[in-house]
Amino acid sequence: MKDELAFKGSEPLTVGVELELELVDQRDGDLTRAASDLLRIVQKRHPTLDVKLEITESMIEVATGVRRDYPGVLWDLRKLRDAVCEGARLLHIGVCGGGTHPFQFWTERQIANGPRMNYLSDLYGYLAKQFTVFGQHVHVGCPDGDAAIRLVHGLSRYVPHFIALAASSPFLQGADTAFDCARMNTISSFPLSGRMPFVRDWSEFQAYFAKMQATGVIKSMKDFYWDIRPKPEYGTVEVRVLDAPLRVERAAALAIYVQCIARLILAQSALVLTEDAYLVYSFNRFQACRFGLRGVLVDPLTRERLPISQDIRNTVAVIGRQASASEQVALREILRCVEDGNDATWLRARFAESGALGMVVQAQTRRFAQANGANDFRAR
Amino acid sequence: MPEYPFSIVTHAFASPLAVTAMLFFGALLLAEAAVRAIRVPRIAALILAGALLGWWQRRLPTAGPTPVSGTLLEALAMVLLFEVGQRVPLDWIRSNPRLLLASLGETGAAFFLVFAVLRYGFGLAPIESGFVGVICMAASPIVVMSVGKDLRARGQVAERALLFSTLSSVYAVLAMQLLMAAYLAAAHARLSVALQPVFQLLGSFVLGSLAAGALRLYAWGARAQGAVLTIGVICLCVLLFACAPPLGLSPILSALFFGLAVRVTDRSHRLLAYQSSETGSVLTLAYFILLGASFVWLDSGRIAVMGLVLVAVRALAKIASNALLAGSTALHPRKGALVGLALSPLSSLALVLAAGLAGQPGLEQAAQTGTAVVLVMALVGPLMTEIAFRLAGEPTRREP
């Protein structure tokens, strides 16, 4: 246990992004089975890129390297997108973002082969197949375990922001769910989901982990499906509440938004929060999932109620004061999202135009593959 | 209530229409029972049930004129070919042009290996070996599509098998035209002989495109959806079937181009609704029962042996060539081999090609040999396609 929980400190505030992507049939937009075939092509043509299989053959995970800034993250994500789209063209399949596939049926999914996948399938039964949802995970570098715990608690306050900004899962199993982010409801079915318990430092966390392991409920850190969790083997804190956005430019901007907030939190030398900070955590989280940027956020300490969109504007104003020029570009993308609406709004608009979810998926694949030259940065 | 003598009752049930209706009824019962009891693939079960009942019906002393209409079978094949045209991902070749080379390679391998075995193994004349080779080049896109739909197969093996089977059918129709024209012109070859396939291709394309335009007009004018749209599709397919031969064009290619033209021009996918209609499913069931019932069993042992050898040779050629060429088209060789296995079926297209030979003097043996191969692969082919899809892990149908 000690080795597993040894926190390998990393350069503070470095960022890494993981994106889970949908693989779809070009004919009707339904999920197809092509992850192994696509992985083989990408690994052969781009051996240095980090592309992995996920729980079913209909999804694939791409990951950036460890980056310090927006241009670095964006450069990596664009390279990954281009490589995956290039392979997909050879296989005549589509690749797209989005937190859920609009009309796939979980009974048709097949769990990919592998010890971890088989373990999850045995343990969780149909939940494993329902886990065909697609998220963005942002890792933020931490110098030590205590800082990681501080960061997990600090970032929890902003979970509604992350959910509302990234929300791209309004449709599920062929119907409009009325949620902007239906993906989080699927994750909530898992017994070890939600928020991390209120521990004050890394030694308290180790004690908690040891107790849980002794009960036999968990084997490793991977068994926690928390919204935000420490990742000791990487020396990071991992934010897991974001839906996979429809464009990599949005994904990069969200990662930088998380990084900028993390900078504020890590600037404080000690944990200033109490467990009361989590008093309305579930309510705020629900508001963000259900209503997206139109949701209401309640501050548990001041009891103040604010629209989530307004709270994001206020936050951007604060973190923008310390932001570099490239970070300002990312924050402008965040404000654009607040003004124009999130990806869930965009998806509903496409459905209103065509009336067919298959056409919505085709629009998603075109949007994902689209090279967006705006806010461009040179290679590094 | 009047009392009928037994002979009148027998006579009433022996009429061609009644026998056809009972054939459908019996075949569906038999096939569905086999699917449930011993998990036979549905398409194979339908063909087998049709074949058994067709054989039994022909042995009945009271049997009147054949109840199974070849015309109906070919008309149904046209509708299914239209659907193949709508589904086949021809635009894939633009992004992965090596697929075209791979498809030429795998059909070429089947042709040359079958030709070599017949010419040098069985001592058949070169022209006859060539004709049988052309029949063996093709694979049935209708069977590949129907098995894929039945299993709801999704993945590279199902997609590539549909693409390659369609392309191989086009090559086979054109090669047959070229070979037949050359055979008929015998020694005095003319330029028009060489141009025959080009005329076929262009003429069928124009006819198919005209049909697609007519369907769009019909859909727009009648605001056609569901069954009304399906009836429009069927009418146009039957029209193509009736009009193409007098114009010297291929009805098979015309139906394929009709489907392709609809796919390309129907950006809103409104006309694709036909595929999931119940009428479409009924036509598929009817087609496979009629196909099985149309089989005439062989009475020559030598031809049967040649047929079985050719089946093995053809399978070997398709599997090996697809495995070898898979790497160049961005696919693992194992999956390439499964594509080759999925290309096993032969059905109505190959039967039409073989029937075209039967009427020509000097080509009787080629026609019989070709029919023998088609017979075996029509029965076993769907099973092999299903095995290929299952080994590739592509079926997504919810099992009961």
Image (cartoon, rainbow, N blue to C red):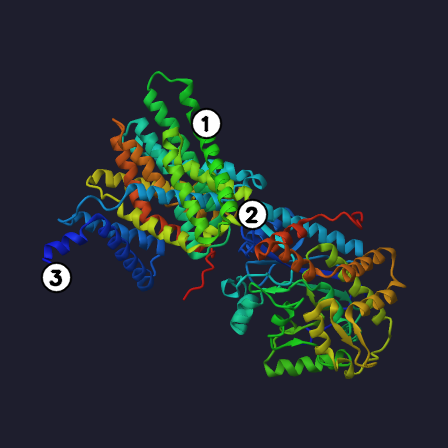
Dot 3 and dot 1 residues touching (CB under 8 Å)? no
Q: Looking at the picture, which amino acid does disc 2 mark? A: Leu
Q: Position of B57 compared to B7: left or right?
A: right
Chain under callout 1: B
Count neighbours of disc 1 (C-alpha within 10 A) and say few if under 14, some if 14 to 19, many if 20 or more.
Answer: some
Q: Which residue is mark 1?
A: B198
Disc 2 from disc 3: Cα separation = 68 Å
* Distance from Cα at disc 2 to Cα at disc 1: 30 Å
Mark 2 sits on what residue?
Answer: A91
From what the image shows, is residue B105 above or below residue A189? above
Q: Is residue B254 left or right of residue A141?
A: left
Q: Chain of mark 2?
A: A
What is the CA distance from the residue labelled 3 to the residue labelled 1? 65 Å
* Residue of label 3: B2
> Which percent across, then down, holds residue A207?
70, 82
Mark 3 vs 1, N-terminal side:
3
Return the x and y of residue B148 as percentages of the image width and height.
Answer: 44, 52
Between A215 and B221, the residue placed more toward the observer is: B221
In this orientation, which residue lies closer to the viewer: A263 or B188? B188
Quadrant (top left, top right, bottom left, bottom right) of the N terminus of chain B? bottom left
Residue type pointed to by label 1: Val
Q: In the rendered view, would you say A278 is above or below A380?
A: below
Q: Residue furthest front?
A: B1
